[in-house]
Image (cartoon, rainbow, N blue to C red):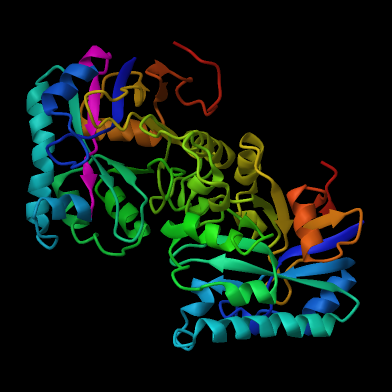
Amino acid sequence: MYKYELHLSTKDFAPKYSDAPSAEEVVENYLKAGYSGIVLTNPWGYQPFKRSDYIYKSPKQLTEEYLEGYYKLKNVAGKELDVFLGAEVTFKHCTNEYLVYGLTPEKLAEFDLSGIYSLKKIPDIFARIHALGDVLIYQAHPFMPYSRVVEEVYQLRPAVRPLEQRIDGMEVYIAKDEEKANHFLTKKWARDYNTPTISGSGYSSVGDRIAGGIATEEKIKDNSDLVKILSNEEYKLISGGEIQNV
Amino acid sequence: MFKYEMHVHSVDVSPCASATAEQLVERFLEKGYTGINLTNHWNPGVFKNRGLTEKNAEELAEYYLNGYRRLKEAAGDKLDIFCGMELAMKGCSNDYLIYGVTKEMLLDLGPYFGYGKIEDVIKIVHSHGGVIFHAHPYRMWMTVLPDHLYNKEDEPYDPDKFDGIESINYGSNDRYSNDMALDFAEHYKIKTITGSDYHNKGGKPYGGVFLPRRAKDMADFVDMIRRGEYALSRMGYYWWEIGDFHPKARFKQ
């Protein structure tokens, strides 16, 4: 089995985490933990972009700085660890975070960053992200304290939202702050409403546990392959460091 | 058994309600209730709509209590009417149901329209002998709160924490929020109530609590709630044994 991390940040573009790990620390620790690859999901949106030293930067500058962290991690990992580009979209005044997979530098360069901070505009934001093509959006730790319940993107009502405005799944396990995350509620929601699930470590501080992610039978070749595997749920979840058989 | 509604609004105060005091009395008597806790909204929107200044606590309190007085007058001796509240603060969509509301409590709560902390509101409510429950905690746009803010059945009572949550709100029109609230309460052993969230003539009077005896007055009612001496009303019926904490126990009538 090949293990892949789906939720981690480095200090290169994670200003909300003062003790976020360096690219070198990430590569060393994930290789030690036996992972084949990682998806870099640095925060993207309100958390980093509303800092006082960022608000005057142009979208192009923000994207360039964001990608520096990805290129650095890729450079450090070399051929030993596969590195894929993702993002963790963040919002104002809540802990809601949405993990995006299938991103490339070219897609990010096309994305208009304006107005992505408001949780009330989430269906439109999702549509714009999906419009980049071959990307998936999952809600990270949906019932972590201070998250807001945003059910409309889960299509639980008869009046449906178009597919592109909807979420692709939820993170049913996060190792970081595991005891606070109300996993029992996330699992219930995923089961009762047939929502696809992923797992992640939420590795964002030095010393965090590497205990989440997915395990696949085959090595993931590239971003498109990652998106295909996630879409088809061709993986097992890693929870508490163990590959789950269910 | 004596049934008391825990979540009702009237047109006199809540801008979203159209039920008059007379309609409430008629409807809840028809459904076999012994009493009602009137829980009109207490939030910046209510008072701004009515052109009242947020800064004058006395005006706000009198305006709010008039709704309660109207209902009490309409009910006469046919229904027990207690003053409650559904409080919200700026910057957060969460609602909180408060029981045992007095004028003194309203005067102390007056300043809390800002981005205050709910922890301070809990202290004020308890200092005035009231109890506070988190209303419909998993409804759309609600903010999930950490479990350590709630009193739990297997821990000593802490006056700095919520008394419990509203696990079933019959005004919610989604598939999931009541289920999630019930599971949250069961997992953490948190006390729950149910409420009709009655606003309009066509509302569903299904919620509330059953007491083993009629409450002598509002303070007595609040004491019984605080001590857990009640069973829940589910669809208007008695749900489980008083003092027993089994949210999914057998249905009893």
Does residue B41 belong to the magenta stretch?
yes
Report x, y in % for residue B49: 14, 51
Q: Residue B191: tell me if it is visible.
A: yes
Report x, y in % for residue B146: 51, 54
Q: Nearer the viewer, residue A178 or B12?
A: B12
Q: Quadrant of the C terminus of chain A?
A: top right
Judge left or right: residue B230 versus residue A203: left
Relative vertical location of residue A141 with respect to residue B66 in this rendering, above or below: below
Q: Quadrant of the N terminus of chain A?
A: bottom right
- The residue under the point 61% across, 54% down is A181
- The residue under the point 51% across, 15% down is B251
Q: Nearer the viewer, residue A1 or B188?
A: A1
Q: Nearer the viewer, residue B13 or A128?
A: A128
Does residue A232 belong to the magenta stretch?
no
The picture quadrant where one finds residue B77 is top left
Farthest residue in the top direction? B253
Report x, y in % for residue A206: 71, 77
- The residue under the point 37% across, 37% down is B226
Report x, y in % for residue B69: 9, 34
The picture quadrant where one finds residue B21 is top left
Relative vertical location of residue B214 with respect to residue B128 in this rendering, above or below: above
Q: Residue A42: tell me if it is visible.
A: no
Instruction: Specify start and end residues of the magenta stretch as a single range.
Output: B29-43
**Figure disc tally:** 0
Judge left or right: residue B127 versus residue A168: left
Judge left or right: residue B44 versus residue A147: left
